[in-house]
Image (cartoon, rainbow, N blue to C red):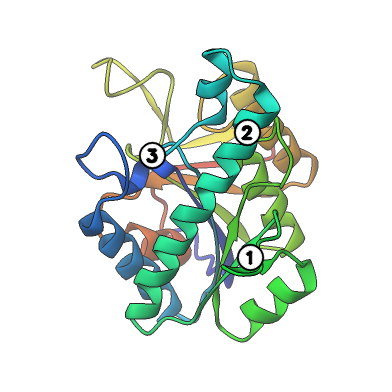
Amino acid sequence: MNNRNYKRVLLKLSGEALMGKASYGISNETLAYVADEIKGLRQLNVQVGLVIGAGNIFRGVAGASSGMDRAQADNMGMLATVINALAIHDALEQRGVSTRVLSAIPMTTVCEPYVRQRALQHLEKGKVVIFAAGTGNPYFTTDTAAVLRALEINADLICKATRVDGVYDKDPLAHDDAVKFDTLTYDEVLRRRLKVMDSAAISLAMDNNKTIMVFDMNIPGNMKKAITGETIGTLIQGE
């Protein structure tokens, strides 16, 4: 137990996290589970911001690797994050959790445009704020968007929810001898080229000394444990 109790957090989910056991799209069962976990954080009066990827629908890098213009492919990926954001918004609202979707790409008929001051006001009123459309610019991942938004809202912690229980020296799903790290520095993540977040996101967190906790989202209650200061997963921070 590190005895820290975080009051405002930025939760980063991959788009693949919403697929469940499917190979594409959104699993209603997984969506409900994620919404219940986030509701649990709000019951602790934790202010929650959320960034979600779009790998379950369309990944810009994959589109570019198949010959599509990278900027166009990334624009498509950012739009796909809005679909995921609206899905989580609906699931949370059905559970009585007041939620707002703020998009870096303006589309006022379906969600609010991202304005930092507006996001802060929503958070202070107890609303979950879902930041959609990445940074609004191509060539930046949703990992980088998550760190950027965490800095803009002055989050106490970035929570990176994954399919494994922390950061390993290699993929634990493919290698039985993979070694888990309990703590890492930003420099170690960059030097070892660990694929927990892209280098731009880690560098941004390092430059601003923003702590990142990586944990398994598939274990019920793990989000609450992370927020209340229990040592789970892997903690990434400065020296």
Residue to which mark 2 is pinned: 74
**Which residue is rendered at x = 67% and y = 36% of the image?**
201
Q: Are marks 1 and 2 in contact (CB under 8 Å)?
A: no
Q: Earlier in the sequence, mark 3 or mark 2?
A: 3
Gap in angstroms between the C-alphas marked 1 and 2: 18 Å
Q: Is residue 167 left or right of residue 23?
A: right
Gap in angstroms between the C-alphas marked 3 and 1: 20 Å
Residue 212 is tagged as none
**Which residue is rendered at x = 62% and y = 33% of the image?**
74
**Foreground pick, 112 / 195:** 112
Question: Horizontal and vertical percent for residue 184?
Answer: 56, 33
Above-or-below relation of 151 to 92: above
Question: Horizontal and vertical percent for residue 64?
Answer: 58, 19
The amino acid sitting under disc 3 is Asn
Residue to which mark 1 is pinned: 102
**Foreground pick, 159 / 143:** 143
The amino acid sitting under disc 1 is Leu
Gap in angstroms between the C-alphas marked 3 and 2: 14 Å
Question: Horizontal and vertical percent for residue 2?
Answer: 49, 58
Question: Horizontal and vertical percent for residue 160?
Answer: 49, 46
Residue to which mark 3 is pinned: 56
**Which residue is rendered at x = 56% and y = 67% of the image?**
110
Residue count near mark 1 (Cα–Cα under 10 Å), binned few <14, some 14–19, many ≥20? many
Q: Mark 1: which secondary structure?
A: strand
Quarter occupied by the N terminus: bottom left
Quarter occupied by the C terminus: top right
Q: Mark 2: which secondary structure?
A: helix
Residue count near mark 3 (Cα–Cα under 10 Å), binned few <14, some 14–19, many ≥20? many
Q: Do we see residue 221 in this rendering?
A: no
The amino acid sitting under disc 2 is Asp
